[in-house]
Image (cartoon, rainbow, N blue to C red):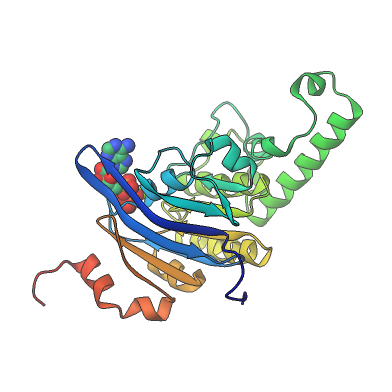
Amino acid sequence: MNAPSEVPALDIRGINKTFGGVQAIFDASFSVAPGTVTALIGPNGAGKTTLFNLITNLLPPNSGSIQFFGQSIGQMAAEKIAALGLIRAFQTARIFPGMTVLENVAMGAHRLMKVPAYRQMLLSSAARREERDVRRRAEMLLDIAGLHGERNRAASDLPMGAQKLLEVIRALMAAPRLLLLDEPAAGLNDTETAELAAMLGAIRDGGVTLLVVEHNMSLVMGVADQIVVLDAGRTVAIGTPSEIRNNRAVIEAYIGREDG
Ligand SMILES: Nc1ncnc2c1ncn2[C@@H]1O[C@H](COP(=O)(O)OP(=O)(O)OP(=O)(O)O)[C@@H](O)[C@H]1O
Ligand SMILES: [Mg+2]
């Protein structure tokens, strides 16, 4: 494990967000240690995706601070945040429909490409080398995700589960330091979910920090080092899987507050 004094990969302090009169996020504070998996859980509408939108600055918070490896990213443009290595995959997989599976994965490397687009069109040797390297990495990740056999299919023809896996490995192509995944197991069958769990462990062991929104509790309990529980915009619990499993506020968030 990491020393407690280490700078967090992500540090969120006092984040508030209202939509009209509705408070979607209420004073959220937590941090994510480098090289760990944090699961963000909570009932539908709890504010999990909203929190991702705030972290990546697709939406501005009303107040609060967000630091990425000690650097304030609260006012930073979304592209700049991604360029620092804070990469996110969406709840609904965003497939480029006219492209193959392999081309979709390769697109994830875009932020790392050093050769400008106009020189790529001239196919300079540097551009060709870079393209070969991207292709090699994309094929390796497709292999790990069990999708290598599908690489030349149109991405839009893939089943939902495979599209979700594609979304995860495309995000990995950007060489993230911190990867945000929004319900990566949604739509996956049991075999795909087991593959995903193994992949998440491998990604973490490869040094990438993970913050994962997920409803699949066996996946969460199996891979998370820390769990943050949101309920109606409030952080109701933060702890290890075994601490969260028996936490009263968590059980209430999921089964309701009526007696019994
Ligand atoms: N852009 C927006 N404008 C207005 N209200 C929004 C917006 N985005 C989210 N909300 C509201 O904020 C609350 C939290 O929504 P959010 O999508 O973050 O929940 P969630 O925890 O991701 O839920 P789910 O598990 O269903 O994905 C909901 O009441 C939602 O309707
Ligand atoms: Mg959501």
User: Where is the C terminus found, in terms of image quarters?
Assistant: bottom left
Q: Position of residue 96 (x, y in %)?
A: 55, 31
Q: Is residue 187 visible?
A: yes
Q: Residue at x 57, y 67 (%)?
A: 36
Task: State left or right for residue 244 relative to residue 209.
Answer: left
**Foreground pick, 92 / 192:** 92
User: Where is the N terminus found, in terms of image quarters?
Assistant: bottom right
Task: State left or right for residue 122 relative to residue 152.
Answer: right
Vertical side of 189 occupied by 95: above or below: above
User: Total label count?
Assistant: 0
Vertical side of 124 occupied by 239: above or below: below
Q: Position of residue 192 (x, y in %)?
A: 51, 58
Q: Position of residue 16 (x, y in %)?
A: 33, 50
Q: Residue at x 32, y 46 (%)?
A: 17
**Foreground pick, 257 / 220:** 257
Q: Residue at x 76, y 40 (%)?
A: 135
Vertical side of 15 occupied by 35: above or below: below
In the image as oriented, which residue stretches furthest toward the left? 259
**Foreground pick, 149 / 132:** 132
Task: State left or right for residue 143 relative to residue 258.
Answer: right
**Foreground pick, 204 / 84:** 84
- Answer with the quadrant where ligand 1 appears in the image: top left
Q: Position of residue 147 (x, y in %)?
A: 63, 49
Q: Is residue 192 visible?
A: no
